[in-house]
Amino acid sequence: MLFDVRRKTVRRAHDLKESAEMHRKIYRAIRDRNPEAARDTMRDHLLLAQKAQESEEAVGDRNPSKGADEAVA
C-alpha cells in the first residue's frame, strides 16, 4: 500500500530534483555526525513536502476528473 501511494505521489511531483538534493544534504549531515544540520535539513524537507502535498491536494480538489486514488498521498 505504501509503495502504491508513493508511486502516485512521485508521478504527480514536480520537484523531484530538489527533493533528491535535500535527501543528499540530510545524508551528508548524518554521515558527518552533525545532528543539528541533519535535524534542520530534515525539518525543512518535511515542511516542503507538507506544502507540496497540500498544493497537490488543492489541485485535486479543483480537478474532480482525477480518480479518488489520485487524491490520496
Image (cartoon, grey):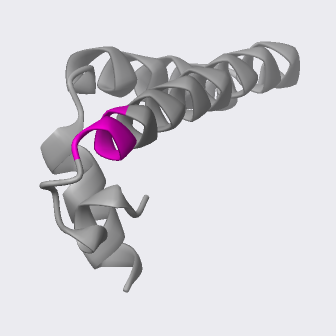
> Image height check: is 72 above or below 29?
below
Which is nearer the eye, 9 or 28?
9
Q: Main secondary structure of the magenta part?
A: helix
**Which residue is located at x 34 percent, y 58 percent?**
71
Residue 14: image quadrant is: top left
Where on the picture, by quarter, is residue 56? top left
> In front: 42, or 47?
47
Q: Position of residue 8 (x, y in %)?
A: 22, 59
61 inside magenta stretch: yes
Left/right placement of residue 25 relative to residue 61 reads right
Q: Residue at x 21, y 62 (%)?
A: 7
Report if residue 70 lies within the magenta region.
Answer: no
Question: x, y percentage for residue 41?
Answer: 67, 17
Residue placed farthest to the bottom in the image? 1
- Where residue 66 appears, as percent x and y from the top left, is 16, 57
Count the marks: how many?
0
Q: Is 30 situated left or right of 10 in this image?
A: right
The C terminus: image quadrant? bottom left
Specify the quadrant that holds the N terminus.
bottom left
User: Which residue appears at 41% of the width and 77% of the height?
Assistant: 2
The magenta segment is: 59-63
Give me the residue at 27% from left, 20% from top. Answer: 15
From the viewer's perspective, tell me whether residue 48 is left or right of residue 24.
right
On screen, residue 14 versus residue 68, left or right, reads left
In the image, residue 10 sits, relative to residue 2, either above or below, namely above
* Foreground pick, 20 / 56: 56
